[in-house]
Amino acid sequence: MNIELKAVRKLRIHWPIPLDTMTQLASGDLGALESDAGIASLLQTLTATPELGGFGNYHHVFESSAGFEGFTVAEGANPTLGSVGQRTISPTFVFTTYFDDSLSEQAVHELVQRIVDIHPWEVPVIEVSGPLSVSSSAHAPVTESRVA
């Protein structure tokens, strides 16, 4: 197997989920990813974006985790969850994928805007990294060797 380094940027999206979905995921029920309307919408949008998660013969590669996010709502906000002055803890699905570093800034902006447009929060947490390298392996062809 040959190891190659690929220049990419990381896209990480924090998405609120109901406690029931968190419980299903924690118990190993991966069907929760498809049955939760919000996560299904996120996955559908990202699957429709060919620039994301390409690693050779593998497409739409992503990593995910479930956790919690905390925040306090400030005056003037219109929160989906919580109220002004209240500390709020939200179950959260964290989706991480990668895209080629050569993608133009305009294309990156359009990609982030598509996510903002479907995100349920007033101020979504979407991280876009600078360039980094990830390993990408390619299997070398198997050659037959003979001993005389």
Image (cartoon, rainbow, N blue to C red):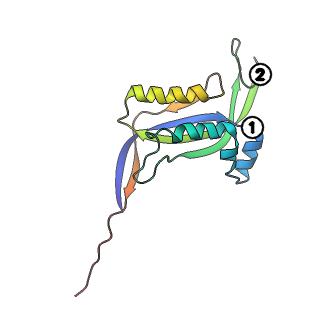
Q: Quadrant of the rendered structure where residue 102 is? A: top left
107 w.r.t. 50: above or below: above
Up/down of 50 relative to 135, above or below? above
Q: Is residue 87 left or right of residue 14?
A: right
Q: Position of residue 19 (x, y in %)?
A: 76, 40
Indicate the quadrant containing the N terminus: top left, top right, bottom left or bottom right: bottom left
Foreground residue among 85 and 37 = 37
Give amino acid for label 2.
Gln
Which numbered tag is attached to residue 18?
A: 1
Q: Position of residue 86 (x, y in %)?
A: 77, 22
Residue sitting at x 60%, y 29%: 118
Circle 1 sits in a helix, a strand or a loop, which is it? loop
Give the image location of residue 88, x and y in percent. Answer: 75, 28
The residue shown at (72%, 50%) is 26
| Residue at which label 2 appears | 86
In the image, what residue type sits under mark 1?
Answer: Pro
Mark 1 residue crowding within 10 angstroms, few (<14) / some (14–19) / many (20+):
few
Query: Which image quarter is the C terminus in?
Result: bottom left
